[in-house]
């Protein structure tokens, strides 16, 4: 019989797979819309699909919309704002010659999520879980850091700051879900997805309208491919938030590192790119860390 306590792991793997597809679609949109425009697509075109998911949950569970307490809005606004900030920092890193180093530091997110989850939510991390998080994170860093990669203080700070913002975002959204205190974690997660995407759509739309309205016009013109990216983004968010409702942000974001394995598999089998010994070591560490995390959980 299936153990429901493992649902968070299933949700996380589905979310990571959907996010891998969304990232591939966004890369194609970057040439037309620029990095900020392509990023905005995940929020703007994801929001309508999130509304559809919410309506489906309301019908399936026979529930009305929840009435969030005031503290809920602080959590969801914090989660939405820090995710935008994390994306902005990552975009800034893309223009940096040390991006590969920055990416390695961004992937320290699970370690930082464990710390922030303990501070803000009281999420306990056992010694075994901490070891698993460190092993998996070491695997990603090993894969990302090439021997000839240049490093400087700016690259380090950009990466750590982006990783911190992503970690705070995960903790913020988990805090929002928990503070709804609903009997149905599915409704709590789905409602929070909608609120998060709504806030992010409004904030980024206002920013682009003030700074670069031509990008908004380009997004509208590219609505056909953007719909698929939006759908995959909303689908990924739906399952991320379902996982956050059941497990700590640190556990979810550590297991989410399987996204790196998905991307590596695409490179290997679709683009025939060989795996280097360094990447093989990194893959082994990620797998070991993920297995240890699942065992510890």
Image: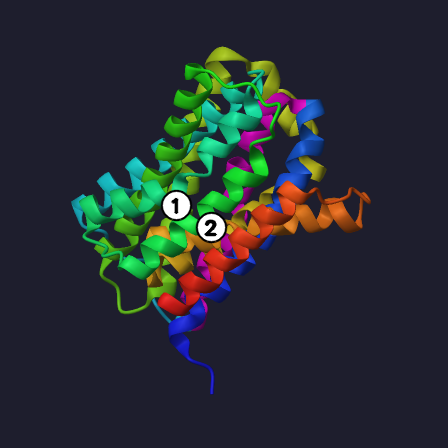
- Which residue sits at x=42%, y=23%? 156
Q: Position of residue 139 (x, y in %)?
A: 51, 46
Viewer-side residue, 251 vs 19: 251
Q: Is residue 47 left or right of residue 37?
A: left
**120, 106: nearer the viewer:** 106
Is 297 situated above or below 254? below
Q: Main secondary structure of the magenta part?
A: helix
In percent of the image, x 60 and y 54: which residue is there? 17
Q: Which residues are magenta?
A: 33-60
Q: Which residue is mark 1?
A: 110
Which of the pair 200/5 is nearer the observer?
5
Percent coordinates x, y for residue 79 in the rendering: 33, 39
Label 1: few (<14), some (14–19) or many (≥20) C-alpha neighbours in 10 Å? many
- Read off the residue under disc 2: 136
Residue 155 lies within the magenta run: no
At x 42% / y 34%, what residue is drawn? Answer: 200
Label 1, label 2: how many angstroms apart (C-alpha)? 9 Å
Question: Horizontal placement of 268 versus 157: left or right?
Answer: right
For the C terminus, give its image quadrant.
bottom left
Crowding at mark 2 (Cα within 10 Å: few <14, some 14-19, many 20+): many
Q: Is residue 169 left or right of residue 124?
A: right
Q: Looking at the image, which residue sits at the far top?
A: 211
For the residues labelled 1 and 2, say whether their Cβ atoms are less than 8 Å apart. yes
Mark 2, secondary structure of its residue: helix
Q: Report whether residue 64 is seen.
A: no
Which residue lies at the image location 79% right of the left edge and 51% below the top edge? 269
Q: Is residue 37 magenta?
A: yes
Number of numbered discs visible in the structure rendering: 2
Q: Quadrant of residue 154?
A: top left
Instruction: Find residue 154 and name its label.
Output: none
Residue 273 % position (x, y): 78, 42
């Amino acid at each position: 019989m299936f153990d429901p306590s493992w649902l968070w792991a299933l949700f996380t793997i589905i979310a990571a797979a959907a996010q891998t597809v969304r990232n591939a679609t966004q890369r194609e949109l970057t040439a037309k819309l620029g990095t900020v425009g392509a990023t905005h697509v995940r929020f703007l075109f994801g929001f309508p699909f999130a509304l559809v998911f919410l309506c489906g949950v309301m019908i399936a569970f026979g529930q009305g919309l929840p009435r969030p307490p005031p503290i809920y809005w602080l959590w969801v606004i914090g989660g939405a704002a820090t995710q935008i900030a994390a994306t902005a920092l990552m975009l800034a890193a893309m223009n940096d010659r040390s991006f590969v180093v920055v990416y390695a530091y961004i992937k320290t997110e699970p370690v930082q999520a464990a710390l922030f989850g303990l501070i803000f939510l009281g999420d306990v991390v056992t010694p075994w879980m901490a070891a698993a998080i460190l092993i998996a994170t070491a695997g990603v860093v090993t894969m990302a850091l090439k021997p000839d990669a240049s490093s400087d203080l700016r690259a380090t700070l950009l990466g750590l700051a982006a990783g911190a913002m992503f970690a705070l975002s995960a903790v913020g959204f988990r805090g929002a879900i928990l503070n709804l205190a609903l009997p149905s974690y599915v409704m709590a997660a789905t409602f929070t997805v909608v609120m998060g995407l709504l806030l992010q759509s409004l904030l980024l739309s206002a920013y682009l309208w003030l700074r670069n309205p031509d990008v908004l016009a380009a997004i509208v013109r590219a609505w056909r491919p953007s719909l698929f990216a939006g759908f995959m983004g909303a689908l990924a968010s739906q399952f991320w938030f379902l996982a956050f409702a059941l497990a700590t942000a640190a556990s979810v974001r550590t297991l989410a590192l399987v996204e790196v394995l998905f991307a590596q598999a695409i490179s290997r089998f679709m683009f025939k790119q060989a795996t280097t010994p360094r990447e093989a070591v990194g893959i082994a560490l990620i797998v070991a860390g993920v297995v240890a995390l699942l065992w510890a959980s």
